[in-house]
Amino acid sequence: MLLESVLIFFLLLAVLSYLHFHKLGFLLFVLFYRVKYMGMFTYFLLLGLTAVHTWQLIGDRTLSHVIVVQVLVRFLALVVLPVIMYIGFFYVHLTLLYRSGPHDQMMSSAFQASLEGGLARITQGQPLDVALGSQVTLRTVSSKPVPCWLHSHKVNYPIRYENGRGSSHQQQVTCYPFKDVNNWWIIKDPGRHTLVVSSPPRPVRHGDIIQLLHGMTSRYLNTHDVAAPMSPHSQEVSGYIDFNVSMPAQNLWRVDIVNRESDREIWKTILSEVRLVHVNTSAVLKLSGASLPEWGFKQLEVVGDKIYKGYQQSGMWNVEEHRYGRSQEQKERELELKSPTHSDIKRNLTFMAKFLELQWKMLTVKNEESEHKYSSSPLEWITMDTNIAYWLHPSSNAQIQLIGNIVNWTIANLALVVYCLMFLTYLLRRRRKVEDIPQDSWEQLVLAGVICVGGWAVNYLPFFLMEKTLFLYHYLPALTFKILQIPIVVEHLYIHVLKSPAQRKAFGVVILAVLCSVYVSYHNLSPLTYGQPALSSDELAALRWRESWDILLRKR
């Protein structure tokens, strides 16, 4: 929320610089989309406007001797330099912030392991090559809905689900969003009984057939033609238990290293993205994203997907924690799995790999997994039907709310409608060869519309396509452009539409009344904006100008 004012500042400064063709105007393009990704839409708008102006320059025969230089300079200043500066900001960012932080879990295992502290203290010094007998934790590459690890525990699927469907009643296999000893699995050679790493180790390669044995319960990872609990179109994944009911084990998996460089690529700790393909059914081990009911402890469902196609992060896994198994006996192995891993070597990603991953996470990660009390839809922003309560005094009704000036909101909406009507009217009449205003005034009106109406549209309409949790403050950049439309409409009406002095005088009176109402609205709502003075419950109730406003009233 605090970034919105900074974003608006650079948006307007960039627009102003462009309109004046200031020599430093191009620098501001990178600043506003460095503040927040939403600034990219305004950047593309101004870039499109630049392309139109450049196209007009190309058609100007009087500039033929410098046109190539003009085009090249604009391309370098508005495209190449902003990209270089944007990447440069993140180079400084990633260089200075090289230690682990509280939200690292959203990043990949490789990214986390490249930072000092945190996961790096666990993964440093681990064997790089995954071998037969390795003890591993498998983390899903996807971070949706949350990062998690392949997991099992000593609880079986219920014999029948709530809807009456039956299960195999075998041991549950889930994806657990916390580090746990039950996340450990052993990579086993199907042709041998040993569960330890040989000397020398036999590395697992792309295309090899393996079994995955759960370290703490000694159940094999299994899938079969039984519907998954929450995703009946997919197969259930389980820890195999032989109930002697004509349901044989199907626990062979083919290792498919997706980001390999050769067909004999060795499975690498952290670095390799692996798809585990079930040999019997060709199903892919996949995180469905659904949460299991109480009998599954609300953990995430893992399924076997038989219609898996293309690259899907939910079907990709990487080894995060890894050690070479040395204990054949179950009790000794349990103690070994509970002990910490070694730590003495550091893995690093290249800057560009970390940069690209960070950009992808910024674009795709959803901040809120559930609807927030003060979240809202874009349609509610236009009519100011929503607000956000930020603070309430512990003993009085003093509070701070995000509530707009209702007069500003209304006049801005009206100005947008009036502009669109004027533009369409002029456009149709000019098509009929009727020119009501001079050519330079028409061009000025069009340019104002491109910047103000276009700026509002590109900062508002994309929210209808976003899945992230939205709040009223997301509308502020778009609202700023719509408010800028007000003086443009007022000036045009005063100069080109109102002809007589009496009309202009009456229009001036109306404008003065509107300005006074803007101040009155601001003054009345200022206790909610600044948190002082504290109002009584009756006074606060009188400020609820819309029924949808959630103004806090302290109970007596």
Image (spheres, helix red, strand yellow):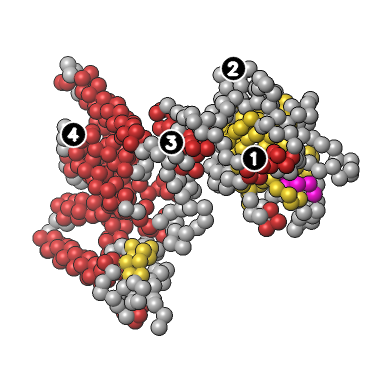
Mark sitting on residue 337: 1
Q: Is residue 123 above or below residue 155?
A: above
- Say which residue appears at 64% left-offset and 30% top-offset: 324
Which residue lies under the disc numbered 3? 115
The numbered mark, 2 or 1, whose residue comes first in the sequence reads 2
Kind of element beneath mark 3: loop
Circles 2, 1 touching at the beta carbon (< 8 Å) = no
Q: Which residues are magenta?
A: 169-173
Q: Are marks 4 and 1 in contact (CB under 8 Å)?
A: no
Q: SS for tag 2?
A: loop
Q: Nearer the viewer, residue 226 or 414?
A: 226
* Horizontal side, residue 58 vs residue 382: left or right: left
The mark that comes first in sequence, 4 or 1, is 4
Q: Amino acid at mark 2?
A: Ser
Q: Mark 4 = which residue?
A: 24
Identify the secondary structure beneath mark 1. Answer: helix
Residue that appears at 85% across and 37% down: 248
Identify residue type, mark 4. Leu
